[in-house]
């Protein structure tokens, strides 16, 4: 019998840089209301993710999945590429 894994967090973001072999930085944007003025504020967070096949490049829209700690900063891994960045000639 195959064991079921626990549900893991999934986020979507944009690859901003390749920071080494099998490592990328993914920027995840989100919107929150200001606590006092109730205006919607755009915020972002930068997450370090594991790219096992080195398949992503800056500008790609990706889905990342929470995982066990892989290094000092890497706690996420690339689960799939949603949209590849356009190739510039």
Image: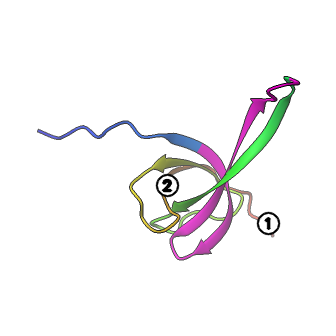
Q: Is residue 17 above or below residue 7?
A: below
Q: Tag 2's secondary structure?
A: strand
Q: In which quadrant of the rendered view does residue 7 lie? A: top left
Q: Which residue occupies the foreground of this view, 76 or 35?
A: 35
Give the image location of residue 16, x and y in percent.
Answer: 70, 61
What's the magenta region? 12-37
Residue 19 among those drawn in magenta = yes
Callout 1: few (<14), some (14-19), or many (20+) C-alpha neighbours within 10 Å? Answer: few
The earlier-in-sequence mark between 1 and 2 is 2
SS at mark 1 in the image: loop
- Identify the residue shown where x is 53% and y is 49%: 64
Query: Percent from the top left, x then y, of residue 35?
Result: 79, 27
> Percent x, y for residue 49?
53, 60
In the image, taking residue 12 as reference, residue 2 lies left or right, namely: left
Q: In the figure, residue 2 lies in which quadrant?
A: top left
Indicate the quadrant containing the C terminus: top left, top right, bottom left or bottom right.
bottom right
Q: Are marks 1 and 2 in contact (CB under 8 Å)?
A: no
- Of residue 88 and residue 25, the one placed in the foreground of this image is 25
Q: Is residue 10 left or right of residue 87?
A: left
* Horizontal side, residue 42 vs residue 63: left or right: right
Residue ID for mark 1: 88
Q: Is residue 42 above or below residue 13?
A: above
Q: Nearer the viewer, mark 1 or mark 2?
A: 2
Relative to 33, say whether 61 is above or below: below
Instruction: Give yes or no for residue 64 being in the magenta stretch.
Output: no
Picture layout, residue 19 above or below residue 66: below
For the residues marked 1 and 2, what is the alpha-carbon distance in whole angstroms?
28 Å
Identify the coloring: rainbow
Quarter of image, res 69: bottom left
> What is the chief secondary structure element of the magenta stretch?
strand
What residue is disc 2 on?
A: 76
Name the residue at 49% across, 68% down. 72
């Amino acid at each position: 019998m195959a064991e079921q894994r626990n549900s893991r967090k999934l986020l979507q973001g944009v690859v901003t840089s390749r920071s080494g072999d099998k490592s990328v930085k993914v920027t995840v944007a989100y919107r929150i209301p200001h606590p006092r003025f109730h205006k919607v504020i755009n915020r972002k967070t930068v997450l370090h993710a594991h790219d096992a096949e080195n398949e992503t490049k800056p500008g790609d829209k990706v889905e990342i999945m929470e995982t066990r700690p892989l290094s000092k900063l890497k706690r996420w891994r690339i689960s799939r590429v949603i949209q590849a960045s356009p190739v510039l000639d």
